[in-house]
Amino acid sequence: MTEYERSRTMPAQPEHVFDQAANVSRLDTWMPEDLHVHAEDPPAVTVHEDHTDEDTPALLRARPEQLRLEWGTREQGSYTGWLQVAGLGSGASEVTVHLSFIDDSHDPGRQTVDDALDTSLRRLEEQVRLRVENTAG
């Protein structure tokens, strides 16, 4: 099993950050650009990957009381992940994303995963900033 984790500080209350991250209809705004989540009968979702043109049955659970998202493949059990938002005080939050590849054959490699995590967290921060600026103005 291979695991990866990245964190990023964001300039918003943890509830605002979590609401943005957990909005299933807006996941495409911050997740890797080649992944698309289609809600079926929550927590069941399908993840479409542009690169392989494959659909994968998955689960996505939001735990608002914990400010946590959890996901993973449904049938293969080859991949899981979570996103956790924590308040830092002064209106800032820290978002941590953790990925576990149980089946190493599904692991695209450290550089690819690190780049995807960094890009996703940056895109989530941009979405959070837009939301906070629109709410304030």
Image (tube, rainbow, N blue to C red):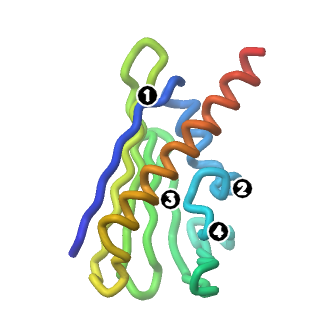
Residue that lies at the very extreme toward the top in this rendered image: 90
Please tell me which residue is depicted at 63% across the width and 68% down the height of the picture. Answer: 37
Return the residue at label 1: 93
User: Measured from the top left, where is residue 116 in percent x and y?
Assistant: 46, 59
Dot 3 or dot 4: first in sequence order is 4
Dot 3 or dot 1: first in sequence order is 3
Return the residue at label 4: 36
Return the residue at label 3: 61
Image quarter of residue 47: bottom right
Dot 1 or dot 4: first in sequence order is 4
Mark 1 and mark 3 in contact (Cβ < 8 Å)? no
- Nearer the camera: disc 3 or disc 4: 4
Question: Is the residue 115 above or below the residue 59 in the image?
Answer: above
Image quarter of residue 49: bottom right
Q: How far apart are marks 2 and 4 (CA)?
A: 10 Å
Q: Residues within 10 Å of mark 4 (few under 14, many from 20)?
A: some
- Nearer the camera: disc 2 or disc 4: 4
Question: Is the residue 25 above or below the residue 100 in the image?
Answer: above
Label 2 element class: helix
User: Measured from the top left, where is residue 33 in percent x and y?
Assistant: 62, 63
Quadrant where the N terminus lies? Answer: bottom left
Dot 3 or dot 2: first in sequence order is 2
At label 3, the amino acid type is: Arg
Q: Distance between the residues labelled 1 and 4?
A: 26 Å
